[in-house]
Amino acid sequence: STALLNTRGTDEVPGESKAFITMNANITSLLPGGKIYNTVYPATYIDYSASKAAGTSDILNYVRVTLDYNPDECFVLQGYSQGAWATVNALTELSGEEWDAVKGVFLVGDPEHNAGLECNVDNFNGTSTRWANGVTSADGRVPDDWIDRTLDVCIYGDGICDPDNAVYPLVNAQHLSYPYDPNTQSLGSSFALYHLGSSVY
């Protein structure tokens, strides 16, 4: 079976991130037995570093515990903003059967967006933000062995993942638009279905 493991952004209420609700409803409607797991972590701006680390820890724990009792489980990891950062940090810790089990990684508004990576796309699946460096790009990036199964979506002018083109810095209108952007939602649905081997994408 399949689990969509989503990690919400800073100050989002606990539960499913708004950035993934629409796409996940679509994915699970087309993949019977698919389930949604909402990463349990503070997602706070205060003590950001500890919050992010707690998110990474919960992602890793969920994948490992699930595989212990269901070795055939498949995962798609999703992260928005601080949740994307927590997800990227988890990737370096996943190897062997864990690496095999994670079929796709879908990130939006990622502060660790690093210029030039093949997984970098804008919300039209284009290249307008391919060369953007996020606000914490110096702290980490999508590892090389994950790039072919990752989409790191950054809307042009997002103050977190594309600060050089942002009219207003940090959490601006572009950064808040992923939940309501039909292109992002469609991209996330088709990406997950493709990487999970569904014929309906």
Image (cartoon, grey):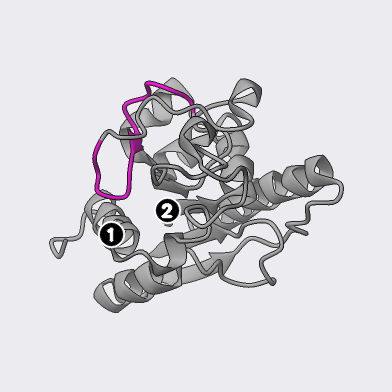
Residue that sits furthest to the front in the current view: 167
Asked which secondary structure carries label 2, the reply is: strand
- Which quarter shows the C terminus? bottom left
Q: Earlier in the sequence, mark 2 or mark 1?
A: 2
Q: How far across and down, in percent of the image, does residue 167 sit?
A: 51, 43
Residue 133, position as x, y percentages in the image: 50, 27
Cα distance, mark 2 to mark 1? Answer: 19 Å
The reply to whether the magenta stretch includes residue 123 is yes
The image quadrant where one finds the N terminus is bottom left
In this picture, is 51 found above or below 15?
Answer: above
Q: Residue at x 20, y 60 (%)?
A: 198
Q: Disc number at residue 76? A: 2
Q: Which residues are magenta?
A: 114-126
Q: Is residue 23 visible?
A: yes
Amino acid bearing label 1 = Asn
Mark 2 closeness class: few <14, some 14–19, many ≥20 residues within 10 Å: many
Q: Are the residues tagged 2 and 1 within 8 Å (C-beta)?
A: no
Is residue 64 visible from the viewing direction of this image? Answer: no
**Nearest the camera: 42 or 63?**
42
Q: What secondary structure do most residues of the magenta stretch adopt?
A: loop
Determine which residue is flagged by label 1: 183
Q: Position of residue 62 (x, y in %)?
A: 62, 55
Q: Quadrant of residue 153?
A: top left
Residue type for callout 2 = Val
